[in-house]
Amino acid sequence: MQDLTVEEHTLTVPLVWDDPSDTRTIDVFAAVVSREGGEDLPYLVFLQGGPGHEAPRPFHAALAPTWLDEALAHYRLVLLDQRGTGRSTPVKDADLGRGASAVAEHLTHLRADSIVRDCEALREHLGATRWSVLGQSFGGFTTLAYLSTRASSLEHVYITGGLSAVGRHPDDVYSLCYDKMRVASERYYRRFPEHRDVMRRLVDQAAEGGIVLPDGEVVSPSRLRSAGSALGTDNGWQTLWSLLELDPASNAFRYDLQSAMPYGGRNPLYFAFHESSYADGFATRWSAERVEPDDFREDPTLFTGEHIRREWTETVPAFQPWREVAQELAEFAWPRLYDENALAASDAAGAAAVYVNDAYVPLEFSLETASLLPGVQLWQTSEHEHNGLRSGHVLSRLIDLAHGRLVR
């Protein structure tokens, strides 16, 4: 890794941007990273996936993004801890002492539209007239909200696995995600047919309360099946294969299963807030659970992806304290995030990677959204899954596409 300079910035901003009478504030933290000789390069703000995850750290070998050097060859990189995460005022279990309704109301102000306003405050603080954005997954959703409201601030947008459905109900998204996971499950079992029987035995064991994780969770069948979310990532099949090869009675199996399942307790927002990221003008009402297809109910060997289950608020120790908050958020009528007309009029320039087999952000709806952004060059690829940005070369391809150095 090259020599880097990191400048840290903490801003105090309104919790509620559009209500001057509401005096509550939060802190928002960002690190500005530059390479030697790159101190005057334009800014690129990275919007992390999630929701509920902080930005990566540039100096920590295990956390520094693989695309860091490529970004720093062209930009000064702004690593923003989105509101509620990391060194920005974090959402934490201790907040629950204020009561579920108060916490749920607080969380309604942590969406992409508010993150955009935080970005604008940070841009002005840094003295930049315009800057560019790299949005991964949920960060891409936030970029769409940016283009819907503050497009004039953006020079180029780079989106990876983050062209969300615009104006569609979360039910549509999660239904299509089940279709993607059906295909991914069958593809996996064609390669490793013996693992289907392994899964049947494990599901039976889970149904009897026979799988208990190191943190005390008694694994339900639906939680067990969520380990299949790994199939939505590059080489995630290896994670699943390694898990299903283990003796279920071993410590290794229990610890690896705990690691493989999505939505741990480290970032409460990721579970409690997740379905809201697809709520472009709707209440979610446990969407993924409601639209589960019949074959998924009948065949417990079919893996699920980023599908939230209400029952986990009863069975997962980390989620139990958040049960009432999650229920209130599920019934909340979320306002629109995106404006189709504003997106089409934004004249957005840049490039987007759309993954053909994306199990989390379906190709079909991504292409619909891409049609609203004719100036954003589209790279449609089956080379990577949803986390393709981590491969290291996706960003370089997008930058070349955006600047006309590469033809689609």
Image: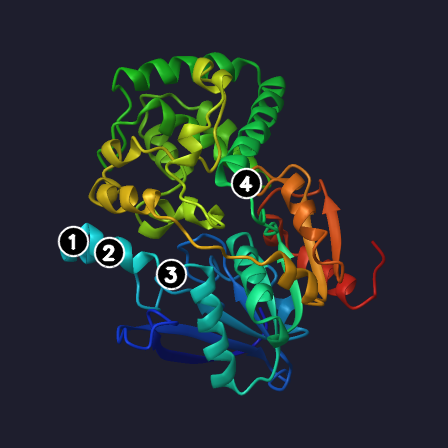
Tell which of 333 and 156 is nearer to you.
Answer: 333
Quadrant housing residue 316:
top left
Rounded to the nearest angstrom, the CA distance separating label 2 from label 1 is 6 Å
Give whichever of discs 4 and 3 has the lower sequence position: 3
In the rendered image, the residue lying farthest to the left is: 97
Task: Find out whether the residues at labels 2 and 1 contact each other: C-beta distance under 8 Å.
Answer: yes
Of circles 1 and 4, the one toward us is 1
The image position of residue 237, as x and y in percent, is 56, 32
Say the numbered circle drawn on residue 221: none
The image position of residue 70, as x and y in percent, is 66, 66
Rounded to the nearest angstrom, the CA distance separating label 2 from label 4 is 27 Å
Say the numbered circle drawn on residue 110: 3
Tell which of 71 and 283 is nearer to you.
Answer: 283
Q: Amino acid at mark 2?
A: Val
Give whichever of discs 1 and 4 has the lower sequence position: 1
Rounded to the nearest angstrom, the CA distance separating label 1 from label 4 is 32 Å
The image position of residue 95, as x and y in percent, is 20, 58
Task: Find out whether the residues at labels 3 and 1 contact each other: C-beta distance under 8 Å.
Answer: no
Instruction: Using the image, determine if residue 169 lies above or below residue 90.
Output: above
Give whichever of discs 3 and 2 has the lower sequence position: 2
Say the numbered circle drawn on residue 103: 2
| Callout 4 crowding tier (Cα within 10 Å): few <14, some 14–19, many ≥20 | many
Query: For the residue labelled by badge 1, is the local secondary structure a helix, a strand or a loop?
Result: loop
Q: Which residue is mark 4?
A: 360
Q: Amino acid at mark 4?
A: Tyr
Of circles 2 and 4, the one toward us is 2
Q: Amino acid at mark 3?
A: Leu
Q: Residue at x 44, y 72 (%)?
A: 118
Of circles 4 and 3, the one toward us is 3
Give whichever of discs 2 and 4 has the lower sequence position: 2
Q: Which residue is mark 1?
A: 99
